[in-house]
Image (spheres, rainbow, N blue to C red):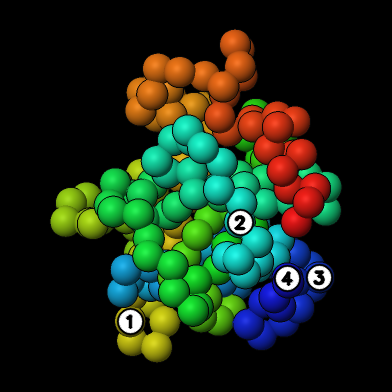
Amino acid sequence: MTEQLPTQSAGTAISAGAGLSRSGVTAQTSQFLTFKLGGESYAAPILAVKEIIEFGQVTTVPMMPGFIRGVINLRGNVVSVVDLAARFGQARSKVGKRSCVVIIETIQDDEKHVMGILVDAVDEVVDIAGSEIDPPPSFGAKIRTDFIEGLGKHKGQFVIILNLDRLLSIEELTLVGDAEAEWLPVAGEHPLRIGHEAAGQLEHH
């Protein structure tokens, strides 16, 4: 089942972010989807958020890199789901009642890429003014600073705005996956591009 975004439907999420760069930070007020992971609050620019999917739709695929939790069938397309905690170099997320997958679209090398990120819970869509967003910290962050676009202030609390292009870089994810295991499912094929075997599994769900 596809869930609606917290304050608006998934179908209107993209138009709501009109004028917002995919990096997320502008001088004007922009909208972000906020969510929880390991007790921390994170945010993604609403323009990059396609929809929210319940975790139960994720299919586990053997012999995948540790940061890939599985795949989902998104209207006939096989989409990899990244375990965000594992991507941060932490232990894999424990799935709970509010765990869900946020479907993200990024543009890399002039091509659109759609991936899912597993989070502990989705909170709400918030407005954050550009004047309320600070640069990433130079040190002391629990995650890589290049994964951070900025620190937004909302209701007296800091929200970590993610740099999705960097976090979900196909080139880096491929290199990390290759470093974790020397195998490839098929010669010349990377686990992030799973192929017909995974698609066949998903057709039965």
Cα distance between the residues tagged 2 and 4: 12 Å
User: Is 90 placed left or right of 66 in the picture?
Assistant: left
Q: Residue at x 61, y 56 (%)?
A: 58
Other-residue count near label 1 (Cα within 10 Å), few / some / many at <14 / 14–19 / ≥20: few
CB-based contact (under 8 Å), mark 2 and mark 4 = no
Q: Specify the amino acid type for callout 3.
A: Gly
Label 1 vs 4, first from the N-terminus = 4
For the residue labelled by badge 2, is the local secondary structure a helix, a strand or a loop? loop
The residue drawn where x is 75% and y is 31% is: 196
Q: In which quarter of the image is residue 29?
A: bottom right
Residue 85 spot, x, y in % from top left? 36, 55
Label 3: which residue? 11
Mark 3 and mark 1 lie on one chain; the one further toward the N terminus is 3
Residue beneath disc 4: 2
SS at badge 3: helix
Q: How crowded is mark 3: few (under 14 residues within 10 Å), some or many (20 or more)?
A: few
> Quick one: label 4, few (<14), some, or many (20+) residues within 10 Å?
few
- Residue 55 drawn at (x, y percent): 57, 65
Would you name the residue on which mark 1 appears?
157
Marks 3 and 2 close (CB-CB < 8 Å):
no
Q: Please state which of residues 160 and 87 is positioned toward the viewer in this rendering.
A: 87
Which residue is rendered at x = 16% and y = 56% of the image? 140
Q: What is the C-alpha distance between the residues marked 3 and 1?
A: 29 Å
Q: Which amino acid does label 1 sit on?
A: Gln
- Note whether 43 is above or below 6 in the view shown: above
Q: Distance between the residues labelled 3 and 2?
A: 21 Å
